Image: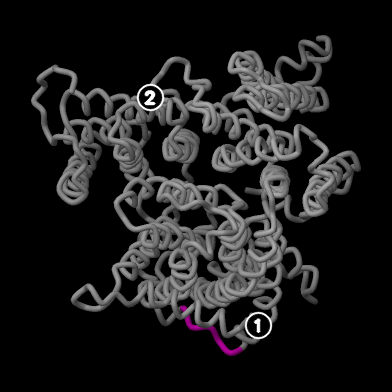
Amino acid sequence: MSSTNEPTRSHGLSMRILRKRDFYAGLLMIFFGAVMAVHGPSYSLGTLMHMGPGFLPTALGVILIGLGIAIGMMAIGVPDGEDEDLLPPSPQWFAWACILASPLLFIVFGMYGGLAPATFACVFVASLGDSKATWIGSVLLSLLITVFGVLLFHFVLQIPMPVLKFFSWSVM
Amino acid sequence: MITTAITDLAHGFQVIIYDPTTWTHLSINLLWCFIGVLIGNMVGVLPGMGPLATISILLPLTFGMKPVGAIVMLGAVMYGAQYGGAICSILLNLPCHPPHAVTCLDGFPMTKQGRGGVALGVTVMASFVGASWGITEMIFLSPLLVRVALQFGPAEICSLMLLGLLAGSTLARGSPLKGVAMTVLGLMLGIVGSDIETGAERFTFGLTELDDGIELIALALGLFGIAEFMNSVNQQAEINTMYTNVRLRDMRPTKEDIKRSFFPMLRGTIVGSLCALIPGTGPTIASFVAYATEKKVSRHADKFGTGMIEGVVAPETSTHSSVQGDFIPTMSLGIPGDAVMALLLGALMIQGIVPGPQLISQHPDVFWGLVASFWIGNIMLVLLNVPLIGIWVKLLTIPYRFLYPSAMFFVCIGVYAANNDMFQVGEVLVIGILGYILLRLGFHPAPILLGFVLGPRFEENFRRAMLISRGDITVFLQRPISAVFISLCVILIGGQIYFRLKPGKKGPAGSEVEQPLAAE
C-alpha cells in the first residue's frame, strides 16, 4: 500500500478527494437533497402552525444536503489507497445487463405476448448472466419456471394476464 | 394480569386453530402458518436468499387473504428463516445470513471435528428456548407498553418515531451518518404521491401512476431483490459439499453438551431480549453481543473459535429471542425496529389495519392470533428441522444460478400482481439500479424501508402536533414524555459522536462486535 501512495502525494487535496467513494456518496445525497429542497417550496410551505404540503420535503431536503456534505467531508479523513473502488473487484457488466434486462423483457413480453412468454424471457435472460450457465440448463430452468408460474399465477391465483396473446400488437 | 394474558392467549389459539365453518373444524390460519414456516425455513437455508426479499415476494399474494392469515404467514417466514440460517453457517462456513454470521466461528470448527450434527441439534434446542422467551415477553410486555402508549398525543408519537428512526439507522451496520442519510431518503420516498391533507401531488413528475405513492413492494424488491442479485451474481463461493451429510442420529447432543449449553442459553436469552427492546438493535447485533459476552464470561476464552459449543448456543439463542422480541415495539407501538418489521407493518397497513397502540384492543384477533401462531410455528419448526434435517441440508447444494433467475420472475410477477400494473415492474427496475448504486457507495439500504413506512405517519403527526401547539416547535420539549424521547435521541447522537472521535473505543454495541463483521 505504501508504494501506491507515492504518485498520489504529488496531487493536491482536491485531486485526492475525487478518488474517494465517500465523496461520491455525499454528492449523490446532496443531489437528492437539492431536488427536494428546490421542488419542495413549489408545493406551498404554509406556516409552522398550518404546514403546507411543501414544508416537510423542503426541510428534509435541507437536512439531506447537510448530511451529504458531512459524508463527502469524511472522504478527507480516509487515507490514500483506501475506499477508492467505485466498482467491485471484478465488475460483472454482462451479468448486470442480464439481470436488468430481465424485468424489461418481462414488461415488453407481458404487454405484447402474455404471461408465458414473459416468464420464459425473464428467467432465461436472467440466468444467462451467471458465468456457469449453459444454454440447455437455462432453457430447462426457464421452461420449468414458466410451467410453474402459469399454474400458480394464472390458474390458482388468477391474475388478470392472459397466458398467451399471439402478438396482436394492440396495447392492452 | 396473568389471568387476562391467559384468556387473551387462549383467544389467540382459538383464532389460529379452530374454525367451525370448515369441515375439519381446523382454521385455514394453521395452514398459512405452516406454509410460512416451510418457505421461511427453506429460504433461510438457501445461500443468497433472505427473509426480506421473500416476504416482499409473498406480500402481494396475501392481498386476497384475511389480515390474520396474512400477518401470521409473513411473520412465520421471518422466524422460520432464522431456523434455516444456522445450517449454512455451521456446515458451510458461509455467513450468508447476517444474524448467523457469528455462528460460523465455532460452528464450522465443530463440523470439521465431525460434530456438525450436534451443533445443529443444540441450535434447534437453543432456537426454541430463545423464541419461547421472546414470545413470553411479548405476551406480558405488550399490554404494559400499550397502556403507556395510549396516553401519547401527536407530539409524543412524533418524538418516539424520531427515536425509532434514529436508532434504526445509527445502531445498524455501517457508518451512522450514511444510515441517517438513508432514513431521510426513505422519508422522502414516502412523501412521493398525493398529500393526505391537501391532495397536492408531490414529486410525481407528471406521472399519474405515482399519485398513490411508490409501491412498498416495488421498493422492497428493488432494494433487497434486484440490487442484492446484482451484488452477489458470480460472487458465490464454491459450495463444499463435504460436510453436508447429516443424519438424524448425528444430531443428538451428549449429556455433557447439554450441561455446557445450559448457561450460555440463559445468557443468550437475556442478551437477545434486551437487544429486542432497544429499537434498532436487531438479531444481528444481538448475536454478536451474545458471542462477545460468552467469550468474556468463559474460563476458556482462548478456546473460542475452535469449536466450543457455547459459541454456537449463545448467539443462536439470542438471535431467536431477539427476532420474537422485535415484534413487541412493532405490534404494540407501531414502531418497527428494522426493515423486516417495517415490511410486516406495511403488510398490516395494506390490509387496512392502522398500526399503533390501539391495535391490540381494536384487532385482538390479529395480535393474539399472531402470538399464538408463534408458539405453533416454533413447534412446527422443531418438528420440521429435527427429522427432516437431511432434506434441508440438501437444499444447500442448489446452485445460485438456478436461484436468482427464478427469484427474478417472482420479483416481476409479484410487483405486477400487487396492482396488475406493468408500470410497477419498471418502478422496481429503477429502484433496483438506485439500490445497487447505493450499495456500491457504501450505504446499507435497510433504513430506507424504515423511513418509507414511517414517513407518512410521521408527517401526519408532526403537522397535527404543530397545529395543536399553534406552531410552537418547543412543544416536543415541553411535554415530559416527548422530552424524554428527544433527550434519548440527543444521547444517541452524542454517544455516536463521542465514540467516533475517541480512537480505540468503538460504539457501545461493541468493539468485538465489529471484528467478526469485518471478517465477513
What is the x, y in percent for residue A1?
76, 28
Determine the image quadrant of residue B149: bottom right
Outermost residue to the bottom: B255
Q: In which chain is the residue bearing label 2? A: B
The circle on residue B262 is 1
Which residue is located at x 62 percent, y 57 percent?
B333
Question: Disc 2 and disc 1: Cα gap in Å?
Answer: 56 Å
Which residue is located at x 46 percent, y 43 percent?
B236
What is the x, y in percent for residue A59?
70, 25
Q: What crowding class fits label 1: few (fewer than 14 Cα within 10 Å), some (14-19), or many (20 or more)? A: some
In the image, is residue B144 above or below residue A16?
below
In the image, is residue A48 above or below residue B347?
above
Which residue is located at x 14 percent, y 34 percent?
A162
Q: Amino acid at mark 2?
A: Glu
Q: In which chain is the residue bearing label 1? A: B
Q: Amino acid at mark 1?
A: Phe
Name which of mark 2 and mark 1 comes first in the sequence. Answer: 2
Q: Nearer the viewer, residue B469 or B435?
A: B469
What is the x, y in percent for residue B143?
61, 69
Q: Mark 2: which secondary structure?
A: helix
Q: How many marks?
A: 2
The magenta region covers B251-255
Which residue is located at x 64 percent, y 16 percent?
A41
The circle on residue B209 is 2
Q: Does residue A91 appear in this view?
A: no
| Residue A42 is one of the magenta-drawn residues | no
Q: Identify the image quadrant of the N terminus of chain B.
A: bottom right
Q: How is the image coloured?
A: one colour
Q: Nearer the viewer, mark 2 or mark 1?
A: 2
The circle on residue B78 is none
